[in-house]
Amino acid sequence: MTAVAVYVHIPFCPSKCGYCDFNSYAMTGEIVERTARAIAQEIRQSPWRGRPAKTIFFGGGTPTYLSESQLIPIIEAVLETHPPTADCEFTSEANPGTVDMPKFAAMRRAGVNRISLGAQSFARQDLIRLGRVHQAPEIVRAVGVAREAGFDEINLDLMFGLPGQSMAGWERNLEIALSLGPTHLSLYGLTIEPNTRYYKLHLRGMLDLPTEDVHVAMYDRAMDAAEAAGLQQYEISNFARPGSQCQHNLAYWRGEEYLGYGPGAVGCFQEDGRRHRYTVLKHPERYCQAIEQGTGLWFDEEWLDEDDLRLEELMLGLRLNEGLSPTIALAERGLKKVLDRGWVEQMDNRLRLTRSGRHFCSEVAAELA
Amino acid sequence: MDQSHIRNFCIIAHIDHGKSTLADRLIERCGAIRGTAQEQMLDSMDIERERGITIKMAAVRLIYKAQNGETYQLNLIDTPGHVDFTYEVSRALAACEGALLVVDASQGVEAQTIANAGMAMNQNLEIIPVINKIDLPHADIDRAREEIEAAVAIDATDAIPCSAKSGIGIDEILEAVVHRVPPPAGDPEAPLRALIYDSHFDSYQGAIAYVRVKDGSVKKGDKIVMMSTEAKFDVDTTGHFGPGMTVNEGLGCGEVGFITAAMKSIGDAQVGDTVTKMPDLATEALPGYRKALSMVFCGLYPSDGDQYEDLRDAIDKLRLNDAALQFEPETSAALGFGFRCGFLGLLHMEIAKERLEREFGLDLILTAPSVDYQITWKGGKVEHISNPTDFPQPHELDLIEEPIVEASIMVPNEYVGAVMTLCQERRGVYTRTEYPTPQRVILHYTLPLGEILLDFFDKLKSNTRGYASFDYELAGYQPSDLVKVDILLNGDAVDALSFIVHRDFAYNRGRAMVEQLRKVVPRQQYEVRVQAALGAKIIAADSIKPFRKNVIAKCYGGDVSRKRKLLEKQKEGKKRMKQIGSVELPQEAFLSVLRVAE
C-alpha cells in the first residue's frame, strides 16, 4: 500500500477570529472531550487502516486547544492506524497562548516533529483587531519553548493587508518573524471571506483595509524579505529553508491523495479508477452522534471527472514555483495572452508564474482553463 | 356537427386576471382531459408556462352536454395577453362569434380589458362579462360590474360571478356560451373560405395552419390555395385540438381546427390569410390580413464568432415557427457577423433570444433595441433606418421622423399627476382624458415609440403602486430632433453601443450610460476610459481603474472543490466576454442602454 497524507481536524478555538471561515467553534466542556474521543475512534475504525502515512497534519481550529490527555490519544490512534514512514513529516498547528512546555514535550515524545504557529502579527493593535487571544511576547516564548521541546522544524503564519496595517507595520512584523529563525514562513494576504464577521464589517465600510496598491506592495516586500533571509518561495504564500518545505501541503498542491479525519475534514482518494472527495460532518455535536451511533459520517461526496481534475491540477500547480506538469492541456488563446503580459514563463519545460504573475494567479488560471 | 350546435368563443382578459385558469376549468368540466395534472393546458410552450403568458394561441374543442339535453361543440380559442401580440389577438377574435370578458373582482377593469373588449366589439362578437376571483377577500362584484358598464359600455347585469380557481360558476359560463353566443353563420355550400388565425411549425408535418372555416368545408386530399400568395398545397390531414392534435374526417362550415399540407415554412400559412380550394375558388378574401409589423429592432450576435452559421440556422428554424420575426445579416466592427432582427415588441425580443439560447444552445449578445426611423436625405430620398450605426451625419439629412403611438393609460384618480409627469418626461403630448368610472380616469397621450420601449411600463407601474394599466397602438411618424450618441472605450467608438436619443436627453442618457458601463465592465489590466460623444464632442467621461491583483492567498485540501467551482465560473465568464480592441466586455454591457432610460 502506498503511503498517504493524513489530515486530522480539531474544530475548537478559544474564540472565533473575525476573518476566520474555517470549521472551528469556541466551545468548552463535555463536547470537547466527547469530540476528542470520537476523533480517535473514527481513526481507529478507518477503512484505510494499515495504510502508511508519509505525512500527518493536525490542523484546526487549534489542536493545542485540547489538553494533553485529549490530544495524545488521537496522535497514538493515527500512528497505530497509519504507521509512519521513516521520514514521515508530522505537523501540528499550535496557537501561542495555548501551549506550554509540558504539552509541547508530550507532543514531541508522541511523534510530532514539526510545529506551525499561528502568529499572524506582532503588533498589538493587529492582534486585537484580528481577535487573537495572544500577544507578541507569547509568540516569542512559544517559539523558544518549541525549540526547547525538541522541534527543529518551526513555521510561523503571518498575515498582511490587515485593517489599519501600514507598510511600516508589515515590515516590522517580517523583521521580527525572521529574527526568530523559523525554518518555514506562511505569509497570507487577508481575504475577506463570506460568512465571517469581517465580511459584514467590510460590507458596511467599517474595515480600514490598505488599498490594493499597498496590498500588492506588501506582498512584494514579503517575497523580498523572505528570500533575503534564505527562505525560498515554493508556493504563492509559502517560503522555506531548503529541505524544509511542508510535504503535507505539497501533497494537496500536487494533486495527491489525502485522508481526512475529524469534523469538517476533507479527504481525497483513488478508488475503482476514480477520484473521490468527501467532507466529514462539520458540527461537533452531529459528528459525535454519528460516531457514537455508527451512522454515516460523510455529508458530502463527489466524484471528480477528467475536467475537474484538469482544472484542479491547473489551479493548484500554478501556485507552486515548480509550475505545471508539461502534459496538461492549456487554452491556446489564454496562454498567448498571459505570456504576452509576462505573467508566466517556461522553465525546464514547465509553465510557471513569474514574480509579477503571482499577483494574478487566479486570473492566469481562468485564462488557461 | 351541424352549424346550429357549434359555438366558437374566446376569453379576453387583462394579464393576471385568470384567463388560463378559467380555460383549464372549462376544459376539465367538459372532460376533454382526464387525469392530467398539468395546470394551464392551453399554454404549451415551456416559456409560456414559465412567464405565465400566452404567446402562441391554441384552440380546444369541447363537447358539452347542455342542460337542455342537447350536445354542443364548443371551440375555445385562446388569445395572447400581451400588448406585443395585438394583431394575433385580433385574428383570434375574428375566428369567434363570442367572447368571455374576464374581469378580476378586486382589480376591476384595466386598460387591456378595454382595448381587447373594444376589439371584440368591432368584430361584432357577443360579449359575456365574467367576474373572476370572487372568493378573494377584496372582491367587489358590484364595483366590477359598474366598471364594466361604464368603461366598456356593455350591459353587465348578467355578468357571471365565478372563481376559476375554486370552480364556482363554471356551469353557468358554459350555459351562457351555448345560449348567448350565436352559432356560426356562413354558407356550407359556398366556395371554401377559412381564416388562418394562427399557425405553428412541426418538423415532421411542416407548417400547421390553425383555421376557422367561414364558408364551405375542407378535407384530406383537397387542393387548397392561399389567397395572399396564391400558393397551392394538397391537404394531408385535417383535425382539431382536444386539446392534443386529433385528426378528423374534415372541417365543416363554422368549425375550428387545423390543416396540414406539407407547407415548408410558417410563411406558407400566414396568420390572417384566407384559405380557399380548387376548383371553386372564392373570389374575395376574408378581411383584415396584414403582414406582421416589426416595432423593435436589435442586433443579434453570437458571443463566439464561430457560431455565426449556427445562429443563422437557428434563426431560420425559429422563423419557421414565428412569422413575426424578421432578420437580415449585418456586421458590426465590434461584434463581427450577426443579424439585424425585427420584433413585435420587447417581450417578443426577449422570448426569441431565450428560445434561441435554450433550444439551440447558443450564447448570444443583443445590442441595444431601437425603433425604425424614417430619414429624408438631402435631395429627397426617404429611407428607414433601425440601426444606430447607419444613422446619418447631421449635414446629410433633411428630416428625421420617429414612430409614435397613441397610448391610453387607465389609472386611479390620485395617480393622475404621477402619470402625467412620467409622460411628459418621455416627450408625451397630452390629448384627452376620459372618466369611465368615478374612481379612475383614462389618460390619452401621443408618445414616441422609442420612449416607451424600454422601461416605460415598469416606471408606470412603480409610480402608481401597480395600479396603472396601459395599452397603445401605432400612429405613424412625426418629425423629431434626434441625435446619435457614440460610446468610446479607450478612445475607440464601439458601434454596438451607440444609441439614438432626442437632443434634449443626450447629455443625461450619455452620462447614465457611462455610469452604467462603469458598473458592469469588470476592471481590466489597464485603465479603461469610458466616454460618451455627440459627434466630436465628449459629453460624459469616466474611467475604470485597472486591477492590481487577483490571487487566492490560501488553498489547502479542504478548499479545493470550492475554489475549483469558482474557477469554473470565472472560466465561463471569460468565455462570455467579448474582446473589443484592448477591452473585454461582458454581455450585459451591450444591454446597458436598457438600464439607463431613467
Image: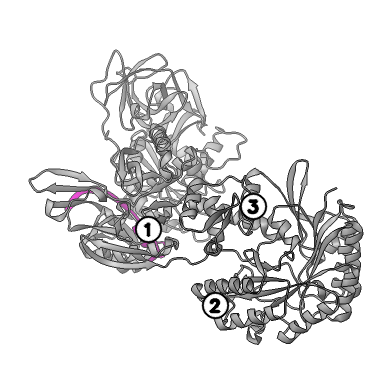
Q: Residue, x 12% and y 54% (percent of image)? A: B395
Q: Nearer the viewer, mark 2 or mark 3?
A: 3
Residue A26, quarter of the rendered image: bottom right
**Secondary element at image label 1:** helix
- Is B424 above or below relative to B89? below
> Dot 3: few (<14), some (14–19), or many (≥20) neighbours within 10 Å?
many
* Letter of the chain that mark 3 sits on in the rendering: A
Residue A291 percent across, percent down from the top left: 87, 59
Q: Which residue is mark 1?
A: B592
| Front label number (1 vs 3) | 3
For label 3, the residue is: A312
Residue A293 visible in rendering: no
CB-based contact (under 8 Å), mark 1 and mark 2: no
- Which quadrant is the C terminus of chain B positioned in? bottom left
Q: As rendered, which of B522 and A237 lies closer to the eye? A: A237
Q: For the residue labelled by badge 3, is the local secondary structure a helix, a strand or a loop? A: helix
Please name whichever residue, B314 or A336, is drawn nearer the observer in this view of the structure: A336
Q: Is residue B500 magenta?
A: no
- Read off the magenta span: B456-478
Instruction: Report whether mark 1 lies on the same chain as mark 3.
Output: no
Disc 1 to disc 3, how far (Cα)?
Answer: 35 Å
Q: Are marks 2 and 3 on the same chain?
A: yes
Q: Nearer the viewer, residue B166 or B78?
A: B78
For the residues beneath circles 1 and 2, the answer to whether they share a chain is no
Residue B220 occupies quadrant = top left
Q: Is residue B468 magenta?
A: yes
Tag 2 residue: A209
Residue B78: in sight, yes or no? yes
